[in-house]
């Protein structure tokens, strides 16, 4: 009470003391607002400018060469006379490594985020999260060097065993989990407790044996593969997934944390186990944030240049068969970086403008996926708040 | 506060004028990664002897030509001759490119040391790079697909290779992997059992195996007398006839010390 009245008096004092001071405050307020507005405006304008300048140099390419060659041919001979500018294989390569890295980084990243936010005790999380985020601080050229000098020769010399161990390590926990969950689900409806137990064990043994068979069968096939060139789509996908991991882990961990203690305790109070709480309550509640994290991570992989330039092999052809991750590929970003040196008005304009066409394509892809993620986040928020 | 700002401004202006002065005296070289080692050891020697700062960047022959045309370097190091289009562009900007041959270089075809192939004909190499031959057993090796390694499009080495081996206007295979420097080609070939690549003679060491072309192994002798079929001159390009420090620098290649450096780096004196 006393404090309130003191505050009241101070305020009224300020009110009375000087009209000049008040006017000054008003001016300062306007100036502050104006400054913040202009900064925000400036950022928005920069985005528009980037679009404008990239498009300005990209459009002449389509005027000179038309659309069909760029999107349907995979003959990339920009330096020849006359040049050919088919970018299909390059676009395909970009999508391939992006998809590959997402397939590695998304399950790992989301699993790590769940582990950090709901499973590890606070004392460990305190140290684990900064360590994961430190991955983001490693410069991409260091990743590229590692990919070229360490991972590529390793893949060539021990490719088969590496694939086999990777398969075992990545897939066996998932198979174990799914065997348990499936046998649980299939026997949940049986009323008689004794029969249910019997069925359960039977299913566990059958499914377990068949999944072990699958593990070893596929493992031995992978073991027999000889990787011809270590600078390939798989190498780049692995490295890019490491680079996308900190983004995915950190942002989705924040999303999981934002779900709040009350919802978790509500779920426990209704008798849910920890697994049920995580899968049925927390994950759906945090799904918009996790999706945003995934898209951010994928954008990181799509836009990365140095690693793909060093370690993808840069050969502009569509692998045979099309899903073969063990062949060298070429991406949009690496092509822009690699060909920019020679591509100048000096040596023919189509060659210069085609790189901007690629840049525009990248820009449009990232713009669209940002819009999509924005829409999903907004919709999810509406659903969650019950509107 | 104001004093500090003034002081800061003073330092900045000093720094700016300082670098401007140094720029005025320094030689700036840009261009080929192949000529790079020669340019660098010339630069070190030149700075020690004459006290003139020389800055060397290696960004590819194409970039070197571009820098010379834009006026951002005084000497362009190139591992190929300037193209007509580049000379035309230079003339348009009032730049008169003059070529000086520094040294000769053989393009060594290299494979992994474990590869049994010892010799290829020029036609075979051309077929490999055009994608007509894709397996080592077609040229007397083991049964394994050939990993073809080329350089990126702004490399002078790539241009010379194309011109000397494949011929103008013929397309190379899209399956070829692209590396951005002699060093990375070497490291890829030395670690990849079924790879083939090409290197400037100066970059060859025991980590890769040099194969004979048309039965001739590249060496100082065979490059100099022209029996090795894949050799080329290396150039310094200047704007107009060089004078002063620029002339001194280029003429290093004619001195005993310069020739020593060139042959020490594995290149061939003219």
Image (tube, grey):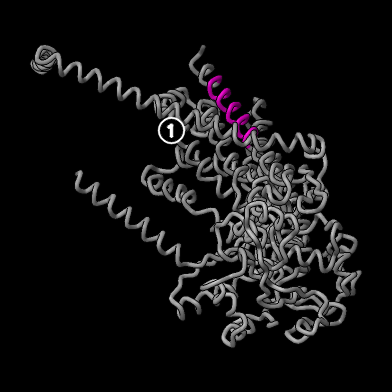
Query: Which residue is nearer to you in this view: B94 or A266?
Result: B94
Foreground of the two, A197 or B130: B130
Residue at image position (61%, 61%) is B59
Q: Residue at x 70, y 34 (%)?
A: A59
Residue at 56 percent across and 19 percent down: it is: A379
Secondary element at tag 1:
helix
* Chain part drawn in magenta: A363-379
**What residue does disc 1 label?**
A257
Quadrant of the drawing holding the N terminus of chain A: top left
The subunit carrying tag 1 is: A
Q: Is residue B179 left or right of residue B170?
A: left
In the rendered image, the vertical position of residue A14 relative to residue B167, given as above or below: above
Can residue A160 be seen here? The reply is: no
Of A247 and A28, nearer the camera is A28
Residue A225, horizontal then vertical, whole percent: 77, 60
Secondary structure mainly formed by the magenta segment: helix
Asked if residue A286 lies in the magenta stretch, the reply is no
């Amino acid at each position: 009470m006393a404090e309130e009245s003191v505050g009241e008096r101070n305020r009224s004092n300020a009110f009375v003391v000087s009209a000049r001071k008040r006017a000054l405050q008003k001016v300062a307020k306007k100036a502050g607002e104006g400054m913040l507005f202009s900064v925000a405006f400036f950022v928005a304008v920069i985005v528009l400018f980037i679009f404008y300048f990239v498009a300005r140099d990209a459009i002449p390419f389509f005027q000179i060469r038309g659309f069909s060659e760029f999107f349907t041919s995979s003959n990339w001979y920009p330096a020849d006379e006359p040049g050919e500018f088919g970018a299909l294989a390059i676009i395909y390569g970009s999508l391939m490594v992006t998809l590959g890295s997402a397939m590695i980084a998304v399950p790992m990243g989301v699993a790590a985020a769940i582990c950090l936010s709901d499973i590890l005790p606070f004392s460990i999380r305190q140290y684990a999260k900064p360590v994961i985020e430190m991955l983001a601080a490693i410069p991409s050229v260091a990743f590229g060097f590692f990919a070229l000098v360490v991972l590529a020769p390793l893949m060539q010399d021990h490719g088969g065993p590496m694939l086999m161990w990777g398969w075992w390590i990545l897939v066996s926990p998932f198979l174990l989990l799914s065997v348990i969950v499936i046998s649980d689900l299939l026997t949940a409806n049986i009323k008689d407790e004794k029969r249910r137990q019997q069925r359960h064990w039977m299913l566990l043994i059958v499914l377990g044996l068949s999944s072990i068979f699958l593990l070893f069968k596929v493992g031995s096939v992978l073991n027999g593969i000889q990787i011809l060139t270590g600078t390939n789509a798989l190498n780049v996908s692995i490295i890019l997934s490491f680079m996308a991991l900190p983004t995915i882990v950190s942002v989705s961990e924040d999303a999981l944390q934002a779900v709040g203690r009350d919802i978790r305790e509500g779920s426990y109070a209704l008798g849910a186990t920890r697994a049920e709480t995580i899968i049925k309550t927390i994950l759906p509640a945090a799904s918009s944030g996790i999706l945003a994290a995934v898209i951010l991570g994928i954008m990181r992989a799509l836009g990365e240049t140095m690693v793909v330039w060093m370690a993808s092999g840069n050969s502009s052809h569509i692998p045979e068969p099309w899903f073969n991750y063990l062949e060298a590929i070429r991406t949009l970003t690496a092509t822009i970086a690699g060909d920019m040196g020679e591509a100048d008005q000096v040596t023919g304009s189509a060659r210069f403008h085609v790189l901007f066409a690629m840049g525009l394509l990248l820009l449009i892809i990232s713009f669209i996926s940002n819009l999509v993620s924005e829409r999903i986040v907004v919709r999810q928020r509406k659903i969650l708040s019950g509107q | 506060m104001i004093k500090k700002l003034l002081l800061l401004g003073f330092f900045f202006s000093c720094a700016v004028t300082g670098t401007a002065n140094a720029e005025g005296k320094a030689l700036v070289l840009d261009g080929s990664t192949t000529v790079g080692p020669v340019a660098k050891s010339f630069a070190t020697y030149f700075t020690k002897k004459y006290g003139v700062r020389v800055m060397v960047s290696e960004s590819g022959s194409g970039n070197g030509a571009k820098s010379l045309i834009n006026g951002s370097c005084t000497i362009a190091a190139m591992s190929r001759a300037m193209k007509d289009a580049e000379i035309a562009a230079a003339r348009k900007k009032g730049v008169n490119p003059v070529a000086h041959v520094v040294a000769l270089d053989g393009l060594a075809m290299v494979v992994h040391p474990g590869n049994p192939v010892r010799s290829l004909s020029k036609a075979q190499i051309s077929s490999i790079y055009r994608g007509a031959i894709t397996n080592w057993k077609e040229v007397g090796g083991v049964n394994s697909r050939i990993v073809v390694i080329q350089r990126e499009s702004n490399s002078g080495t790539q241009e010379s290779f194309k011109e000397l081996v494949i011929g103008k206007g013929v397309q190379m295979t899209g399956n070829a992997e692209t590396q951005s420097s002699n060093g990375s080609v070497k490291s890829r070939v030395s670690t990849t059992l079924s790879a083939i690549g090409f290197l400037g003679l100066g970059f060859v060491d025991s980590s890769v195996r040099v194969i004979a072309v048309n039965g001739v192994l590249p060496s100082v002798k065979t490059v100099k007398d022209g029996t090795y079929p894949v050799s080329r001159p290396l150039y310094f390009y200047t704007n107009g006839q060089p004078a002063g420090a620029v002339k001194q620098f280029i003429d290093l290649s004619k001195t005993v010390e310069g020739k020593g450096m060139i042959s020490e780096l594995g290149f061939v004196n003219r």
